[in-house]
Every structure is written in C-alpha cells, then in structure tokens.
Amino acid sequence: VDKPLGLSSAAVVGRVRFALEYYCRASGDPAAVGRSKRKPWIKVGHGGTLDPLASGVLVIGVGNSTKDLNTFLKGDKEYITTALFGYETATMDSEGEKMNEVADLLNVSVEAIEKKLPEFIGDEVMQRPPQFSALKKDGVRAYKRARDGEDFELEPRPVKVVTYEMLHFDLPRAEFRITCGGGTYVRSLVQDLARAIGSAAHVAVLRRTKQGQFGLDGCVAFDDLQDAEVIINALKKGKAVNSDGLDAAQ
C-alpha cells in the first residue's frame, strides 16, 4: 500500500480488514457466517511501521502470512527525504518542539555536505536512535519515556547504510536518497549529517520508496482499499512474487 501522510500504519491495516470482512459477508462466504461485525476475525498485519508523518511503501500481510512478514521484508529499504536546515526538533521531524537553532546557515553548502556523506555509508555505521522511537529502554518504550520528560539516551548501535546521496539542494532544504538496512533511522542520519558540518537540521519530508522486493510502482493507493477485489488481486500478485507462497500486498 502507498500509505498517505497523516495516517498511521494501523489505520491502513484497519481499512484492509474492513474491506475484506465486508466482502466475505456480502458474497456469502461460509467463513463469515456467525461472525460478529464488531469483532475483527480476518488477520491483517503490516511490516515495517511508517509514522503518520511518513508516506510510501507499507507491506501488508493477510491470514497466516502475518506471522511470516519478515520473509517479505528481506532486503534493503529506500527512502527519499527532505532535510530542513536551521534547527533540530525533539522528535527529529517536523512534529517536535524546535531546539538547537543555529544563527545562520553559512556552514551548509553542497561541498560541505558531499564531503561528509561518505562518513555515513557502510555496513557498520554507528548511530544513536532517536528518543522518540519504539525501541525499549529498561523494558519501556523510548517514546513513552520521552513523552514523560525523562532525561535519557539510547546506546549507539551499528546500522547498514548502502547509499546516502543528495538529489537536490536549495537552502534551507536538501533532498536525499537513502538506501539502508533494517533498524536504520533516517531521522538520525539527517541530524547527524547536519551536526557533522556544524549545523542543525531535521526531517521535513520522508517517503519510503522501496522495502525489500516491493516498490512504489506496484503499490495499491489507499483510496482503492475500499475495493476488496483490488486487495485480493494485490495479494495474489504478492504470492506470485514470493517464492515461499505466502500472501502479502503492498
């Protein structure tokens, strides 16, 4: 599914489930007989959460494939992101409170950025995850601690960054294409790059263009999820692509 801005990944799952359950009831599917309309009964899940402020490829699994979504998520992810220079935010994106504002952008140039980009490419790039993330700190989600105003840091960890290239530069914004492995935070990459050139920045736009074998060119538009047959066809396509014969749609 091509998830639009402003919606959670869970909202996309809910739309898919509703459409499929309605279709089963309307078509007289025996599996729907006696099922409550209030209690979901078709298993639907997603792999690789996208925040509401991000858009793009969201892989959806239905039925038994919800247990094996990692099979579909093997491989790298690709993102197109726009960095806004001038200040950081608490969440490292446009939603958070402004902080660490710089007086000017004299340090920000094409030359300065391109000189530092290679430092963030490799199989083991050390990265400190954002405080506003789903990772756990002493058994508690980091974002919950951050929302409660706790002062803490997550430990740096190695991540894989295959490509980190600048596509467009027009101060105070710069657009990048990033290909990376699982567990990599684009928000951290943007903030760390800005700090490396003596400036500050946060993610203003984030769009996932690829996840594993799935790309935007084969995605179902969110508005089309009202049609169960569109979903079913996408699931069949996903099953054909995947060698393990599981069901997934994008």
Image: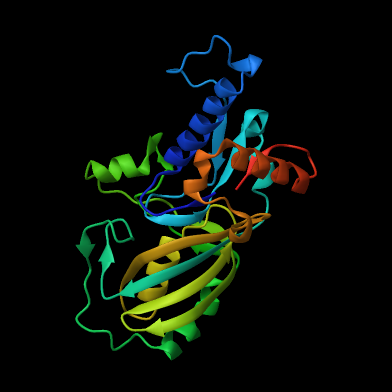
Which quadrant of the view contains residue 38?
Answer: top left
Does 108 sit above or below residue 139? Answer: below
Q: Position of residue 21 (x, y in %)?
A: 54, 25
Does 81 sit above or below residue 154? Answer: below
Asked which colour scheme the image uses, the reply is rainbow
Q: Is residue 219 left or right of residue 89?
A: right
Q: Is residue 29 left or right of residue 159?
A: right
Q: Position of residue 173 (x, y in %)?
A: 35, 78
Query: Residue visible at 53% across and 13% down?
Result: 35
| Residue 84 visible in image | yes
Which quadrant of the view contains residue 244?
Answer: top right
Looking at the image, the residue that sits furthest to the right is: 243
Q: Is residue 105 left or right of residue 181?
A: left
Query: Residue visible at 61% across and 23% down?
Result: 27
Q: Position of residue 22 (x, y in %)?
A: 52, 26
Q: Position of residue 58 (x, y in %)?
A: 54, 49
Q: Is residue 193 left or right of residue 243?
A: left
Looking at the image, the residue that sits furthest to the front is: 27
Of 238 and 158, nearer the camera is 238
